Amino acid sequence: MSRLTVKVFYALATQAAPLYAFGIMSEQAPAMDLDYVANLARIELTPEEKARFADQFASILEYFEKLKAVDVSGIEPTAHAFPVENVWGVDEPAPSFRPEEAMRNAPAQRENMVVVPKVVEDA
Amino acid sequence: MATDLIWQSATALSALLEKGEVTSRDLTEAFIARAQAVEPSVHAYLDLHTDYALEQADQADQRRQLGQVRGPLDGIPVSLKNVISIKDLPLTAASKMLEPFVSPYDATTTLKLKNAGAVLLGRLNMDEFAMGSSCENSAFGPTFNPWDTERIPGGSSGGSAACVAAGETPLSLGSDTGGSIRQPASLCGIVGMKPTYGLVSRYGLAAFASSLDQIGPMAHTVEDAALLLQTIAGYDPLDSTSFNTSIPDYRAALQEAPKKWRLGVPTEFFGEGLDPEVKEAVQRAIQWYEAQGCEIVEISLPHNELSVPVYYVLAPAEASSNLARYDGVRYGHRSSEAKDAIDLYFKSRGEGFGPEVKRRILLGTYVLSSGYYDAYYLRAQKVRTLIRNDYLKAFEQVDAILTPTSPTAAFKLGEKKDDPLSMYLADIYTISVNLAGLPGLSMPCGFTQDKLPIGLQVIGQPFKESELFQIAHAYEQAHDWKTTHPNL
């Protein structure tokens, strides 16, 4: 899927269909679709949190607009302060946790397995 | 005797141990007694593990009797920010999410401290998952500034700074992602140091923003910070970003005569937003260096003002990925209200994380989401390059850079709590150092009229910690800020 298709898809998927999703940026900072983002992040928010965060994000995103004024043409991105080459570990067996050590912090367990809610539908 | 001990430097305490004038048990008991006396008003500790500490102290005393001393830290109490794991002890990162968690292994820094014979005294309060500048984001209540308990100690390593300032431990470890060691050190009137990225292993440090996080020492003196860094620095195969370089003898370097360094002063760090009292104290420190024959060079770091927006795009982006592991499945908080597997994620995370952690995860998720990646994340990474280039250019002219650590002295509790953006701006002088991966140190350089400490930041070149310590040590030797202690 091309990037444009993804953007269009996203715009259609979120009912707001904001213009900025097509790359047309207004001078104002775009508003964040909090429900959409909270869903991506898998965090349940209370109505009070939503209201408070919406205001706070508005001022933070407005502050982020400073970045748009910078000429970054021809500038390479920095992911790390120092160039890090791929680091390979030696593929040798080494001592590791016993099952009970690894399971020590599991919120629910049975026979050294983590118990989770059912993830498959009934037949 | 005990009150004399609590204000000594770790180096001085080490000498007392060596002369046989005190035992490690004496020291450990003195600091425990002090902590028990002042904790009701400071709340630096989340966990003071008294029995565990005394057991280690007795072992250190035994080693000393047998002539098996492991080095200058043997028998000296050190307290750790509660984001660095100690095997078999709880690790909470000051979050409800990890309230039930017990570390299955030691962090590399912890292991190095254990091997050096240090007495691990307790676990220190912090902003939840190291996200914050005031220590008010702890799920277990804030830490209070020992100089004025109506004020914040700074953050995120607020407990690590406050406990040294209050005489509750001679040494502590903090972690610094955007200023989290240096800013609280400044606000509490102690020395705090963020090493070059990659100098200290991050293995066993609960991750916040992996390309920025570093563990570092907090202490009464520059020499103590050098001693502690000496112990924890070094290549670690368990951290793939750990840098394989030889570690010089930092304390030996302090014996050398001070040089006439070329020191850069960035004009951008002395403009709008800087408190006049802080400005004056820092300028006096700069004048002192000049009077010693150092050359003061006006430099420009034009992209520094962008470091706050760059940081608050990049750090939350990395955090949103790092904190995805807290899903309520294998460890940490699990909601008892979940209807199904997906709901388990939503509810466990909704209940377990505090407001600032949620804000950062959401912000990070947003800037990485489809349609925004280029506009925010990639662009911020490019501006990060510009910020780093500013420093590299400056270091062609100067040996180190002098700035204020924080634009103001400690602010009041609650003052910025509901205004995240104004809180973020408290780190305007420290963040770019993390973005560029440089070492930075904060040390006391005066007090405001209200008797609140002011910090001077010295920024060094990559892996030149020795020189950074020398520059700071020269100033410290000529001033006696550390002889004033808070009234608690």
Image: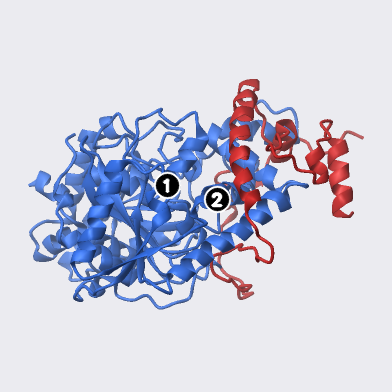
Chain colours: A red, B blue
Read off the chain for label 1.
B
The secondary structure type at the circle numbered 1 is: loop
Q: At 49% across and 41% down in the image, what residue appears?
A: B424
Q: In this view, does B339 lie above or below B247?
A: above
The amino acid sitting under disc 2 is Tyr
Which quarter of the rendered picture does the C terminus of chain B lie within? top left
Answer left or right for B112 relative to B243. left
The amino acid sitting under disc 1 is Leu
Read off the chain for label 2.
B
Place of residue B466 in the rendered image (x, y in percent of width and height, measured from the top left): 32, 71
Looking at this rendering, what residue extends furthest in the bottom direction? B246
User: Could you say which quadrant of the image residue B354 lies in?
Assistant: top right
Labels 1 and 2 within one chain: yes
Looking at this rendering, what residue extends furthest in the right direction? A123
Q: Sequence-wise, which precedes: disc 1 or disc 2?
A: 1
User: Could you say which quadrant of the image residue B400 lies in?
Assistant: bottom left
Answer left or right for B488 relative to B328. left
The local crowd at label 2, few if under 14, some if 14 to 19, many if 20 or more residues have their Cα within 10 Å, is many
Place of residue B122 in the rendered image (x, y in percent of width and height, measured from the top left): 33, 46
Alpha carbon of mark 1 to alpha carbon of mark 2: how far?
32 Å
Residue B311 is labelled as: 2
Q: In this view, does B288 lie above or below A108?
A: below
Choose between B134 and A5: the one closer to the eye. A5
Q: At 55% across and 46% down in the image, what residue appears?
A: A104
Answer left or right for B230 relative to B255. right
The secondary structure type at the circle numbered 2 is: helix
Place of residue B292 in the rendered image (x, y in percent of width and height, measured from the top left): 18, 68
The local crowd at label 1, few if under 14, some if 14 to 19, many if 20 or more residues have their Cα within 10 Å, is some
Circle 1 sits on which residue? B89
Q: Can residue A48 be seen in this view?
A: yes
